[in-house]
Image (tube, rainbow, N blue to C red):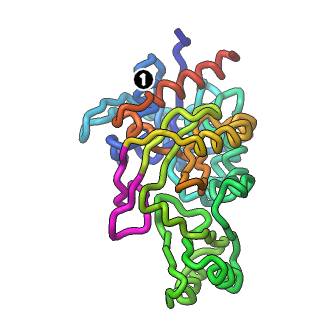
Amino acid sequence: MAKQMNVAVQMDHVSTIQIEGDSSFAMCLEAQRRGHQLFHYTPSQLSLRNGQVIARVEPMTLRDVAGDHYTLGPQERINLEQMDVVLLRQDPPFDMAYITSTHLLERIHPKTLVVNDPAWVRNSPEKIFVTEFADLMPDTLITSDPEEIKAFRADMGDIILKPLYGAGGAGVFHLRSDDKNLSSLLEMFGQMFREPLIAQRYLPAVRSGDKRIILVDGEPVGAINRVPAETDARSNMHAGGRAEAVGLTDRERDICARIGPSLKERGFLLVGIDVIGDYMTEINVTSPTGIREVKKFGGADIAALLWDAIEDKRSGT
């Protein structure tokens, strides 16, 4: 039995989450079940003063009851070095606010175990980290140059175009080879974002689903298939995708074996990768989701496996 730990959770406010599919909620429920004390705070309550990383936290108790899922205690100001674990779980966008929080949390890690490692979260943006495994990906272009994007579509035919640091399916477009909207879309993106865009060859296999595979400490532990609605190119659950039970193919196990050592080296205890057909499209390290869906469809209790890994890290085993 692991010793009781103090666990701070940096997240979007607990009042805003939809508990049925929320992985952070599942992780916190399991920590609470094991006797760990939870403390809640939002990124705006994180500060650095005279070298100390402090946060205004509230003790948190959770219940798996929709509409009545949490109780918060009186707020207190603490040095996060007092915590055994900090869960870095706010949702993207992966912007300068997110990056700044990783700089602050890096000051306390690993004395206080931050999950995932904040320095490597900062240095491994999910749509860029994946390009280290180019042979496992569909043809991909990252650029701000409209001419490069137009040439890429001319070579590929149908493409997917999306913001480099987007999330949840927002701003994802399927552009066919004869679509007349590319120039206007690039003008719009140019007004909205300073960062490059990412273009990928369209994979027709997405109509059968975009598989989310979850890895704990570099090992695959479960998967869920996300099937897009008939009227949408996106499979994200936030965009109307339908979840269904699924296993892993030999190709997907090979992909996980290839990336697993890099995940362990970077201290990524919880990762979600996206696979369409035979190709990996993203490595999600900021706030991976899918834990509750996997268990709902009879798969592994990933929250329990994650806490086994966290407790092992804290005990030095």
Q: Residue furthest top?
A: 1
Mark 1, Cα crowd under 10 Å, few <14 / some 14-19 / many 20+, is some
Residue 274 visible in the snapshot: yes
Residue 154 horizontal/vertical position (percent): 64, 84
Residue 74 appearing in the image:
no
Q: Which residue is found at the position 47% from the left and 66% from the top?
A: 170
- At label 1, which amino acid type do we have? Gln
Instruction: Using the image as rendered, state which of residue 308 and residue 54 is in the foreground.
Output: 308
Q: Secondary structure at mark 1?
A: helix
Q: What is the x, y in percent for residue 175? A: 51, 78
In this picture, is 87 found above or below 92? Answer: above
- Residue 34 lies, with reference to residue 170, above or below; the image says above
Tell me where residue 314 sits by quadrant.
top right
Residue 12 versus residue 256: which sits nearer the camera?
256
Identify the image quadrant of residue 109: top right
Q: Which residue is rendered at x = 34% and y = 41% of the image?
A: 19
Q: Is 169 placed above or below 61 here? A: below
Is 231 magenta? The answer is yes
Horizontal arrangement in the rendering, residue 145 relative to residue 3 (left or right)? right
Q: Is residue 192 left or right of residue 241?
A: right
Which of 217/191 is in front?
Answer: 217
The residue at the point 48 percent across, 24 percent down is: 304
Is residue 183 found inside the magenta-colored segment of the image?
no
Q: Position of residue 235 (x, y in %)?
A: 42, 59
- The quadrant the C terminus occupies is top right
Q: As rendered, which of 119 and 224 lies closer to the eye?
A: 224
Q: How many marks?
A: 1
User: Which residue lies under the disc numbered 1?
Assistant: 32
- The span picked out in magenta is 226-244
Q: Residue placed at 68% from the left, 44% from the top? A: 104
Q: Position of residue 71 (x, y in %)?
A: 33, 32
